[in-house]
Image (cartoon, coloured by chain):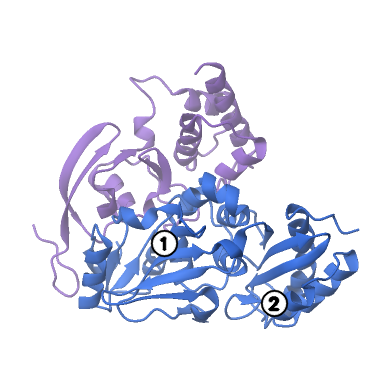
Chain colours: A purple, B blue
Amino acid sequence: MLTRNSAGVAVMKKLALTVNGRPYAFDIDIRESLLDVLRDRLQFTGVKQGCSVGECGACTVLIDGVPVNSCIYLAAWAHGKSITTIEGIAQEGQLSPVQEAFVEEGAIQCGFCTPGLVLSTTAMVESGRTYTHDEVRRELSGHLCRCTGYQKIVEAAERALREAEAEP
Amino acid sequence: MFDICELFEPETLLEAKRILRHDPSLKVIAGGTDVLIRLQHGDLAGSGLLSLKNIAELEAIRLLRDGTLEIGAMAPFTKIFRSELLQKKVPVLCEAAVSMGGPQVRNVATIGGNICNGAVSADSASTLFALDALLRLETLEDERIIPMGEFYAGPGKVNLRPGELLVSILIPREGYEGTGGHYIKYAMRKAMDIATLGVAVVCRVRENRFEDLRIALGVAAPVPIRCFEAEAHAKGREITLETIQELAAMAVKPSRARTSWRASKDYREHLIEVLAQRALAEAVKRAGGCRAH
């Protein structure tokens, strides 16, 4: 199968990457976003498509541990990278401490923004840094939630950070 | 899917310059947080992209022997904000860097891209302008170093010649040493918003007098501007509340603010004066001067 663009030029490229610890290698179309590849080719549908222009944060994944909007990231750029989606957060059916904190604080309503927020919070916890209240709010500011009003999300993130500090 | 016809991903600057020399019509893409959004909106359809993402040498932030700070064009905003060197030498630039977009955007968006897309609202542009920064531009054959003020040509337009790439941003020692600075971004939201107005102030203070003052404004004219009249007026003047008020009023003069859906011309002019006052007072404080009262 050879995909061609409107000018009739073949636009395939080899992509080798790791998603949630598992290696993958296949051909992609250079026109695809990382979001397209994760959702449509690999069926990681926990990566949500919201605004498609990097405003809402629903499509956030971790690329080598760093939160990135996968909708405005070329799939080709993920070559050689290690990606974490929400599917890679729970281990053997056990929720991660960050996920537990979101459940405990009631920081979830419709759930559409939750995968992204859990990933951004996970990146904060794994950075080993300490964050002030304002810094937590700043680090989560690239996510839109239309249900909760953010208060409980911030409380969940702070709980996760506090607990990680207590038990490193 | 993004409507692009080609994607080049060179791993060295030399290779990138060769590719661009061969086809100057390629659209250069850095972090992609502007170019990919424009593609998503149907602009730039059918473009070929030259991605600088894999060129590690363009990400470096370093202090040169003569005291010049050199920031690679591909340094992402988060890297700038977290850089210990920059936090120590030019905290005002870090302040501007962390005001841009949101965390996920700052993790990929680059300072070079922010400048090259020519947006008058670019948070890094006014601050770099106030720091007397220079831009290192290279083609396969040539290199030139120009001041920020000569780079902006109009809204969304910059003086990049065919085949030319922005390689790094240089902040000479005289631009930052012994200065205090403050950047105020005024927007409707604290994150994920574009500046309604941006004010960057950098100053040097001695015995409660302005030794040197630089004020740059974003979104106050079609391109980022400096307030040269106010800057000249400040030289040697005693720092009092009256001086600061006077300088802030003068800062409005070179502006050519316009009415847009974000704000009216009158409101923007009001913002320039009020925010310039606040930024001046804070910059003076950080420069070690007495607080004006």
- Mark number for residue B118? none
Vertically, is B242 above or below B159? above
* Residue at the disc numbered 2: B227
Subunit under mark 1: B
| Image x and y of residue B280, in percent | 76, 63
Closer to the chain start, of discs 1 and 2, is: 1
Residue B65 versus residue B165 in the image, above or below: above
Q: Residue furthest top?
A: A167
Q: Quadrant of the N terminus of chain B?
A: bottom left
Q: Amino acid at mark 2?
A: Cys
Instruction: Tell me: B182 left or right of B82.
Output: right
**In-front residue for pair B219/A23:** B219
Q: Residues within 10 Å of mark 1 (few under 14, many from 20)?
A: many
Q: Disc 1 marks which amino acid?
A: Ala
Q: Which residue is mark 1?
A: B73
Question: Element at badge 2?
Answer: loop
Q: Foreground residue, B37 or A45?
A: B37
In percent of the image, x 28 and y 55: which residue is there?
B54
Question: Dots 1 and 2: beta carbons under 8 Å?
Answer: no
Quadrant where the C terminus of chain B is found in the figure = bottom right
Task: From the top left corner, tell me how far across and down residue B90 is, in percent.
Answer: 59, 55
Which element is circle 1 on? loop
Q: Give percent across and percent down for residue B246.
A: 85, 74
